[in-house]
Amino acid sequence: MLIQYIIGPAGSGKTTLIKSLVEYLQEYNQEISVVTINLDPGCRTLPYTPDIDIQDYVTVDAVMEKTGLGPNGAMIAATDLMVNYVEDLKYEINQYNDPEIILVDTPGQMELFSFRNSGPMIANALGFGSVKRGIIFTYDSTMCIHPNGFISTLLLAASVQFRFANLSQINLLTKKDLIHKEKLENILKWVDDEYELASATENLEHGMLRELTLSLGRTFREFGAISELLPISAKYGEGIEDVWGAIQRVVNDDTSPY
Ligand code: GTP
């Protein structure tokens, strides 16, 4: 069993990716059993029906009503409260007879799940027995068309890698249909070649910002944080087979941690 946590900035396409992946598996890999979990206590509607939903246990609305907190405070409290329901989530997962893949949708405010304690605690608690765990990080391509936006997203992705230390991370460039082909190719070149990123910063950034961009790019490359970035359009089902291929590599990787 592999549990894949889908993490990324608000609106970067996490939920749409889950919908698209489930549809892809239903169409091409019906023998694969997949379970979806919603871990966002604040979402109003989802484009798919999760098999397991944290909102059966805790919701932002209920926390607001009970505590009088505003939406932001209630979102923080609700995310922290999710830890109390780990055993219920485990119980529900066990009802599915050892599914091969579990896709977990995480809150849009990624810092609540990733940088407070609840996310890593839940990820650890659900990693029981021989369950493998991994992260899929969603880079929103519309935020990455300029080098500084690309580096900022890279910083977020690297922070998530630190917080969920040792978990494999698949990096996706989402919504590729929304940017010009030329811009998409530029972003992919920045991943592959540090000189491309350096020359892009020459035109766009100045002074300290340029130095910072270059130095961060270099550091991330040295530590392997800039690795493969798979372009997809979950909305139009493009690149989803590559995502599935990447997930299978994690499943088959014996060095990937449990
Ligand atoms: P939060 O949970 O609120 O952070 O959002 P999310 O990361 O789950 O993103 P979601 O899947 O809800 O997508 C946000 C918006 O982007 C929605 O309007 C989607 O329809 C749109 N979107 C997602 N993926 C794509 C894509 O591949 N192409 C296009 N054009 N739009 C997309």
Image: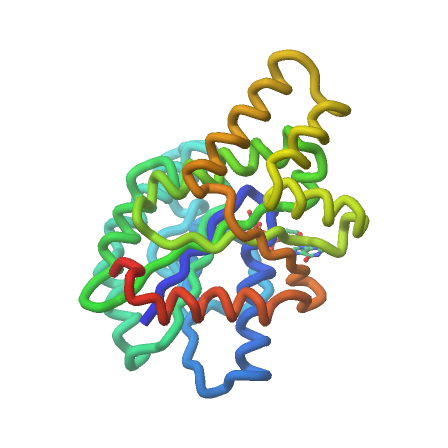
User: Where is residue 237 shown, x and y percent of the image?
Assistant: 67, 68
Q: How is the image coloured?
A: rainbow
The quadrant of the rendering that contains the N terminus is: bottom left
The vertical placement of 119 against 28, above or below, is above
Is residue 39 visible in this depiction of the protein?
no
**Pick the front one: 243 or 72:** 243
The x and y percentages for residue 128 are 20, 63
Residue 231, image quadrant: bottom right
Q: Residue 3 versus residue 122: which sits nearer the camera?
A: 3
Question: Where residue 85 sits in the image (x, y, percent)?
Answer: 26, 55
Quadrant location of the C terminus in the rendered image: bottom left
Give percent across and percent down for residue 167: 34, 52
Q: Is residue 62 visible?
A: yes
Quarter occupied by residue 223? top left
Q: Is residue 144 above or below residue 130?
A: above
Q: Is residue 121 above or below residue 255?
A: above
Name the residue at 37% across, 36% down. 115
Left or right position of 179 against 223: right
Q: Nearer the viewer, residue 2 or 120?
A: 2
Identify the residue at image location x=36%, y=52%.
58
Please give the name of the residue rendered at 59% of the width and 18% of the height, measured from the top-left corner: 211
